[in-house]
Image: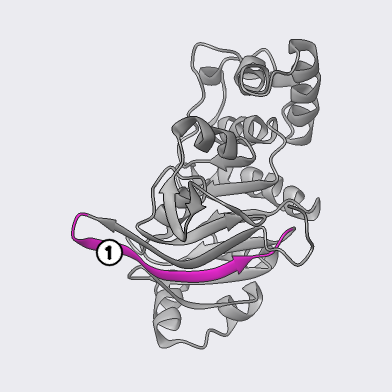
């Protein structure tokens, strides 16, 4: 489905439980196509869980999530939702790139092989086509000279940039980032954020869990502040970070910005 009025991601009354604990409590908001949305909030507020629900790595207990109007993880029949097969869920995930806190590169494969494996095995691209695009992506993330390197030879920031290139190699319509800089030494954070800024400039739809408030303020089209499994406040990035309306948001931001 392609419609400019259709949000890239639509969360509708999304609930998620782990045992008796509700970790998502009626999440309801949209991520417009071509926009950058940052999820901020204290640890344990449900941000990463919400992100993982977008590509059905976590199964929701109520509500619905749609990507470009297509229901994620379930099919609807006679007014009820039925979970789709893992094979069909994997097909949906192929359109959604995800970058985790840890880089998850295959240590026994070169940088180039890490990036080309999924396009060849999942999408059926030829090795030559996949390698040509992988080299383009490495150039975009500033690592054109590292194609034949092994992950162990790279810094954390370089490994994370390779992880971003690997996700982009599947030509996704949407990118999810789960605190992509949290495992990095402070001096390496900037190089990863610079790549993300370029993606934003190129119009990639991005949903980002982050503690980088400068990035959220300057790059995000919208920021959603989460606490206790709910979205307490959301709005334009600069407005939420610089002039939050809710006391809970103000308290969180003052605790990390002071």
Q: Observer-nearest residue: 174 or 200?
A: 174
7 or 251: nearer the viewer? 7
Q: Is residue 39 visible?
A: yes
Q: Position of residue 157 (x, y in %)?
A: 57, 36
Q: Quadrant of the C terminus?
A: bottom left
Name the residue beneath numbered marker 1.
22
Disc 1, SS: strand
Note whether residue 211 is visible: no
5 horizontally vs 208: left or right: right
Decide whether residue 8 is among the magenta residues. Answer: no
Magenta: main secondary structure equals: strand
Considering depth in this image, is 207 or 119 the residue closer to the camera?
119
Say how many tags the image has: 1
Q: Say if 244 sits above or below 113 in the image.
A: below
Residue 99 position, x and y percent, is 55, 40
| Quadrant position of residue 217 | bottom right
Q: Residues within 10 Å of mark 1 (few under 14, many from 20)?
A: some
- Kindly give the residue lying farthest to the left in the view shown: 20
Question: Which residues make up the magenta segment?
Answer: 19-33
Q: Residue 46 falls in which quadrant of the image?
A: bottom left
What is the image's colouring? one colour
Q: Residue at x 61, y 63 (%)?
A: 37
Find residue 122 and report its horizontal and vertical position in percent.
62, 22
Q: Please state which of residues 221 and 160 is positioned toward the viewer in this rendering.
A: 221
For the point 50% across and 53% down, which residue is it? 76
Q: Position of residue 115 (x, y in %)?
A: 64, 23
Identify the residue at horizontal 41%, vertical 87% (top origin): 247
Name the residue located 37 percent from the left edge and 65 percent from the top edge: 42
């Amino acid at each position: 489905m392609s419609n400019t009025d259709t949000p890239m991601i639509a969360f509708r009354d999304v609930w998620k439980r782990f045992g008796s604990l509700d970790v998502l409590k009626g999440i309801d908001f949209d991520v417009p196509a071509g926009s950058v949305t940052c999820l901020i909030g204290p640890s344990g507020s449900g941000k990463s869980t919400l992100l993982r629900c977008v590509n059905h790595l976590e199964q929701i207990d109520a509500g619905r999530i749609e990507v470009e109007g297509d229901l994620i993880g379930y099919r609807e029949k006679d007014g009820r939702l039925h979970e789709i097969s893992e094979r069909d869920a994997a097909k949906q995930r192929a359109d959604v790139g995800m970058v985790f806190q840890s880089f998850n590169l295959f240590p026994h494969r070169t940088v180039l092989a890490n990036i080309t494996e999924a396009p060849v095995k999942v999408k059926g691209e030829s090795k030559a086509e996949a390698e040509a695009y992988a080299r383009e992506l490495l150039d975009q993330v500033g690592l054109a000279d590292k194609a034949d390197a092994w992950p162990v030879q790279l810094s954390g920031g370089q490994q994370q940039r390779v992880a971003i290139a690997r996700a982009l190699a599947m030509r996704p319509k949407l990118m999810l980032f789960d605190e992509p800089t949290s495992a990095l030494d402070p001096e390496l954070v900037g190089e990863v954020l610079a790549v993300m800024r370029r993606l934003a400039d190129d119009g990639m739809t991005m949903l980002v869990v982050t503690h980088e408030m400068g990035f959220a303020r300057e790059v995000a089209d919208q920021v959603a502040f989460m606490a206790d499994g709910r979205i307490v406040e959301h709005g334009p990035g600069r407005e939420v970070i610089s002039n939050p309306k809710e006391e809970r948001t103000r308290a969180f931001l003052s605790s990390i910005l002071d």
